[in-house]
Amino acid sequence: MADPASYRPRPGEIPTQPGVYRFIDPHGRVIYVGKAKSLRARLNSYFSSVHQLHPKTYAMVHAAASVQWTVVGSELEAIQLEYTWIKQHTPRFNIMYRDDKSYPYLAVTMNEKVPRVQVMRGDKKPGVKYFGPFHPAKAIRETVDTMLRVFPVRSCSAGVYQRAEASGRPCLLGYIDKCAAPCVGNISVEDHRRLAEEFVEVMAGRPGPHMRRIEEQMKQAVADLRYEDAARHRDDLEALRRVFERNAVVLSEDTEADIFAFAQDELEASAQVFHVRQGRIRGQRGWISEKVEELDDAGMVEQLILQIYGDMPDTERIPREVLVPASPENHAELTEWLSARRGARVSVRVPQRGDKAALLGTVQENAEQALSLHKTRRSSDITTRSAALRELQEQLALEEPLLRIECYDISHTSGTNVVASMVVLEDGLPKKRDYRRFSIRGEAARDDTSAMHNVVTRRFRKYLQESAELDVDDPGKFAYPPSLVVVDGGQPQVHAARRALDQLGLTDMPVVGLAKRLEEVWLPEDDFPLVLPRTSEALYMLQRIRDEAHRFAIAFHRTARSKQMTASALDEVPGLGPKRRAAVVAHFGSVANLTEASAEQIAEVPGLGLETAQKILSHLRGEAESQ
């Protein structure tokens, strides 16, 4: 660990203007971003009484090797720059709010030709209208079921829709009048889109015009003595009322607000928000974050608002009011930033009395319960993971803690299509965005040890190049070295990896191998393996990363093999050159997909005509018959 005194700026060197600062580790990775009214006062607080710092702040200043800062003209500029850098670098010591659970949304895919209603979780997609989040999930499914009675929009998957379209028969929902069945022409695509737009308008909280229209239709049906139609309209009207009476009116109908509250202890913080639209609670969300330094509610408010509304692609969802438990220090600048994001005035304030203050208390209670539940659920997992890393470090007699572990695996079929994978664990958890795949050709592909030597050489040669040309604003893909290299295999593979690292001058980087047969741990300098107990958490962690590397390598190998088989099957098609052959391979991916396609579908590939497509099909089907 670095001594903060070794990189502390000299007295008077730090400016007193507002600005944004970055702590950087020995490998050039930005590990913390912060802002300050006075850079000098803020940065000096990190170095003056190091032993009195918050535990995670203490760890951060000892993990860093340097600190940099940028002076800006105002606090508003500081907010914007801090937000940009946090999103760019994702520093490990910054507060990163993550959902404490996955909430479902009601989504209408208005970006499709025939819009679809569905329940979705995960990342938002452009062109899709989202409503929620809802909790529990049962509530959203009941809402969808009720709404489809009045607005029978398509809710089937693409496969079901295509089969119905091809067969000319609608699915069950079409028969029971919960789908207008555009697949078989019961309604035109244009009329179905208008139906979906009405569905969206009602879910957006504007049911009044549609309810009045249905009521008029009911009265007209009664006047015309069409009592069955009148009963149907009455049931539709009641269904809409049920949807909008599920959430009690808690505030005036023109209230549009997000209400935040927090609960925290020394290490973690819980945040909760209620989304209130048209005076009703439309949804609830929660986040759990690890604390890096002591922050009061005002500081938490600022961090959360920047992350939540800064990431929001649909800025129309930013409400007119943001109600918080404490006013942030830079209230004016934060309000200005939010208003600019929304394109209209946004009020950030602390409710003092009345219904809004009472609802804030309810949100606060939810935050406290969420933190308590999170502590209960996560304690055993965090403890086990930390114990596994500590045990592995002790068993391998390593001085440095295992912050990052990389594992390598080779995959091939009888020496052909040789590929390799690299998977990463950071703090005992997979870091999938750092996973890498390698294709191996030539002499390096003659056996597993040559392939392992080649892959390790390529990975760490790139690391050395990027370290020499380090750009803090754009770190390379291989810029960060692991604390431990794990290879899938026994002594030969370990020796190959060790030799590659020694040739690059990385003699201090530890390497181990995990052999599948007896789950033995091999070290390069030992003639006999290290045998860990079967109940060892350290062995379980090694098995987990080895199996993940194997899975990742197998997936890449299958893709490579499929493409090669497709390409070789097209080698003898007359008039099909390398470029057009590659285009066909990229479009269909496998021989099976290509064989099942029609000549017209193959002709859709850029550069191919119908005549060439027919030659491809004749060639493939001729080969199949000869077999």
Image (cartoon, helix red, strand yellow):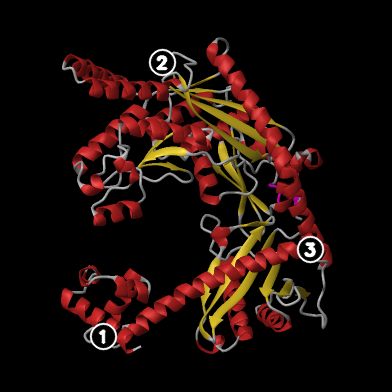
Q: Is residue 95 above or below residue 466?
A: above
The amino acid marked with disc number 3 is Leu
Can residue 405 be seen at all in this image of the molecule? yes
Secondary structure beneath label 3: helix
Task: Name the residue located 23 percent from the left edge and 82 percent from the top edge.
Answer: 618
In the rendered view of the protein, which quadrant contains the C terminus? bottom left
The amino acid marked with disc number 2 is Glu
Label 1, on which residue? 573
**Which image quadrant is residue 497 in?**
bottom right
**Which image quadrant is residue 496 in?**
bottom right
Q: Is residue 575 above or below residue 2?
A: below
Q: Please provide the residue range marked out in magenta.
A: 4-9
- Specify which label sits upstream in the sequence, 1 or 3: 3
Please tell me which residue lies in front, 164 or 316. Answer: 164
Label 2, on which residue? 253
Please tell me which residue lies in front, 538 or 196. Answer: 196
Can residue 74 be seen at all in this image of the molecule? no
Q: Is residue 472 above or below residue 113?
A: below
Label 3, on which residue? 392
- Specify which label sits upstream in the sequence, 2 or 3: 2
- Specify which label sits upstream in the sequence, 1 or 2: 2
Q: Is residue 476 above or below residue 173?
A: below
